């Protein structure tokens, strides 16, 4: 009997140890919501991949508003997160405040690359969205029959102007006479999660002749793409491959490979080779691009886009960053 009890005690200790000391990935979602079918959901799916392929546990926090982000981040850190992913520019202050208090925890701050004197455990990841958007702008112009294309952004901030600017420049690179319509959904965080307003803006652009509409609006973009499909025009998704959402009406999606960033830093955290500092990621790094699967990109379009991609990488084609305007 004593031997059996000892075995049970040892087994319990082993279970406790495995649970307590397993690597954990924490995800703090942006205000668009965990299941936005875009930015946040891509982080969630990547965390699931980390869980499945690397054997980590997952801890999550979804704030009702931005004032809860720091508190939620501290709770995730207190629960033993090995790596915490802060989704979005609005989490910059929270990361800057929390990271120094948890030096053994690593942080990936997505869309944050301006922290002064950051702690050595922060990976700041920013992307050249204007480069990827240039490519889908080219595709939009090549697909358009009306000579008018549209863009619907979420919150009117410099980050989203990068998407808009790249798209505008890419479309004009193909057709200097094309008309590019653009609207932002709002100036507050609610602009990320208002599909009804997104649909209204897209419909207004379609009524003005747009036969391709690109969205960079988080959860609001679901309404944009639905309106495009309902009107029988082409939609362009963002961040993740959204081509599956409306088969036959999705031209392409602009890919922002934050999934690769998160997974890579999880691997490096486990290996003890985590990278801190500011990282600007674009076409040259393979971190932006466009989706072909289940989309309507033709061989002709692809050839033109591939040639332009090479030009952007080698510097012969300059894509202006509208966030600096």
Image (tube, grey):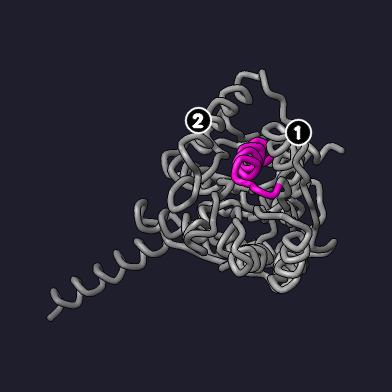
Residue furthest right as drawn: 325
Task: Indicate the quadrant containing the C terminus: top left, top right, bottom left or bottom right.
Answer: top right
Give the answer, above or below, for where 204 lies relative to 250: below
Residue drawn at x 63%, y 66% is 231
- Report x, y in % for residue 20: 42, 63
How many callouts does the rendering have?
2
Q: Is residue 22 magenta?
A: no
Residue 197 visible, this orientation: yes
Please name the residue that numbered disc 1 is placed on. 176
- Report x, y in % for residue 86: 63, 55
Residue drawn at x 54%, y 44% is 257
Q: Choose top left, top right, bottom left or bottom right for residue 220.
A: bottom right
Q: Is residue 141 magenta?
A: yes
Q: Is residue 272 left or right of residue 285?
A: left
Q: Nearer the viewer, residue 322 or 261?
A: 322
Q: Is residue 318 left or right of residue 273?
A: right
- Report x, y in % for residue 107: 60, 48
- For the residues carrying marks 2 and 1, which lies nearer the camera in this image? 1
Q: Nearer the viewer, residue 292 or 263?
A: 292
Please name the residue that numbered disc 2 is placed on. 303
The chief SS type of the magenta part is helix
Q: Which residues are magenta?
A: 125-146
- Report x, y in % for residue 237: 59, 54
Crowd around label 1: few <14 · some 14–19 · many ≥20 (10 Å): few
The answer for how far apart the CA atoms under marks 2 and 1 are is: 19 Å
Mark 1 secondary-structure assignment: loop
Task: Indicate the quadrant containing the N terminus: top left, top right, bottom left or bottom right.
Answer: bottom left
Residue 127 visible, this orientation: no
Mark 2 secondary-structure assignment: helix
Residue drawn at x 47%, y 61% is 247
Residue drawn at x 34%, y 61% is 18
Q: Choose top left, top right, bottom left or bottom right for residue 235.
A: bottom right
């Amino acid at each position: 009997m004593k031997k059996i009890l000892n075995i049970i005690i040892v087994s319990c200790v082993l279970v406790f140890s495995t649970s307590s000391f397993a690597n954990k990935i924490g995800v703090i979602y942006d205000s668009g919501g965990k299941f936005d079918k875009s930015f946040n959901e891509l982080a969630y799916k990547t965390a699931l991949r980390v869980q499945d392929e690397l054997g980590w546990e997952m801890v999550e926090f979804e704030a009702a508003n931005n004032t809860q982000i720091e508190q939620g981040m501290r709770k995730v850190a207190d629960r033993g997160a090995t790596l915490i992913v802060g989704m979005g520019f609005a989490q910059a202050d929270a990361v800057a405040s929390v990271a120094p208090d948890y030096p053994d925890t690593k942080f990936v701050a997505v869309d944050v690359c301006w922290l002064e004197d950051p702690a050595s455990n922060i990976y700041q990841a920013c992307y050249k969205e204007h480069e990827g958007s240039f490519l889908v702008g080219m595709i939009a112009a090549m697909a358009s029959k009306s000579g008018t294309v549209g863009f619907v952004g979420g919150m009117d901030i410099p980050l989203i102007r990068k998407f808009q600017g790249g798209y505008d420049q890419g479309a004009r690179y193909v057709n200097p006479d094309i008309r590019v319509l653009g609207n932002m959904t709002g100036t507050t965080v609610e602009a990320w999660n208002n599909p009804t307003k997104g649909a209204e803006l897209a419909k207004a652009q379609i009524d003005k002749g747009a036969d391709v509409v690109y969205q960079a609006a988080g959860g609001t973009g679901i309404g944009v793409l639905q309106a495009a499909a309902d009107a029988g025009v082409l939609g362009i998704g963002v961040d993740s491959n959204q081509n599956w959402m409306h088969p036959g009406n999705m031209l392409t999606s602009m890919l922002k490979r934050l999934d690769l960033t998160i997974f890579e830093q999880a691997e490096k955290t486990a290996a003890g080779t985590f990278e801190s500092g500011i990282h600007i990621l674009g076409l040259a790094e393979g971190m932006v691009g466009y989706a072909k699967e289940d989309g309507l990109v033709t061989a002709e379009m692809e050839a033109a886009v591939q040639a332009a991609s090479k030009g952007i990488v080698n510097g012969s084609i300059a894509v202006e960053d509208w966030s600096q305007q």
